[in-house]
Image (tube, rainbow, N blue to C red):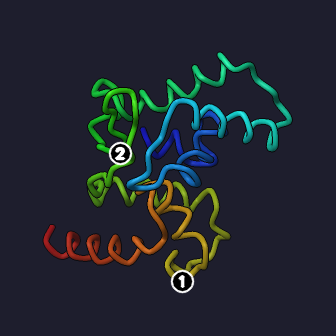
Amino acid sequence: MHYHLSAPHGPGPSFWNHLIARHVRIGHALSRVSISEVIGSFLKESEMKTLGNRTLQSAATVFLGTYAKSDGLGKLGLIEEESGSYTVRQPQTPPVRVLACALHDYWEAFGDGSSEPPPERPGLSGRFCRIVFSGTGHAWHSVVRFAVGQALWT
């Protein structure tokens, strides 16, 4: 679910990808106010839309609640709420099969039809890792090592 909401070609709102890819960083604090400001700026710049403060704050509440509440995506461990403030945490690595499905979908949407694997194509692995891990492209090599190790044992 997180991947589909966050993927630039997914069904989630356009600002969702922007938040995950550019503003949700491990160890950073988030607030409803800061997230609503980012959403407002993004929509104004990218879609020439201006939304009211209540609408922007509602969108921020939905975004943060989706990741902080246990009945949402809270089990991923990406965003943790403590007394009304939010902190981005290091989520657990998704199962290899989940990574494979997400990578296939992303590569199909943004690949150039090349048979070259993503680590050899500059930029693709970094964007994918920011969506899946909310980190940087440097995580890619760990993912590959992890996936290869899992494949050898399954």
Furthest residue to the top?
Answer: 54
**Residue 99 placed where, x, y %?**
37, 58
- Which of the labelled discs sits on residue 120, or is there none? 1
- Which of the labelled discs sits on residue 39, or is there none? none
The structure residue drawn at horizontal position 44% and vertical position 51%, both measured from the top left corner, is 28
Characterize the local packing of mark 1: few (<14), some (14-19) or many (20 or more) Cα atoms within 10 angstroms: few
Q: Nearer the viewer, mark 1 or mark 2?
A: 2
The structure residue drawn at horizontal position 29% and vertical position 70%, both measured from the top left corner, is 147
Q: Amino acid at mark 1?
A: Glu
- Compared across the picture, whether 49 is left or right of 84 comes to right
> Which mark is first along the chain, 2 or 1?
2
**Residue 31 placed where, x, y %?**
49, 35
Q: Amino acid at mark 2?
A: Leu
Circle 1 SS class = helix
Location of residue 73 (image quadrant): top left
Report which residue position mark 2 lands on: 78
Asked if marks 1 and 2 touch (Cβ < 8 Å), the reply is no
Q: Is residue 29 above or below residue 109?
A: above
Q: Toward the viewer: 122 or 55?
A: 55
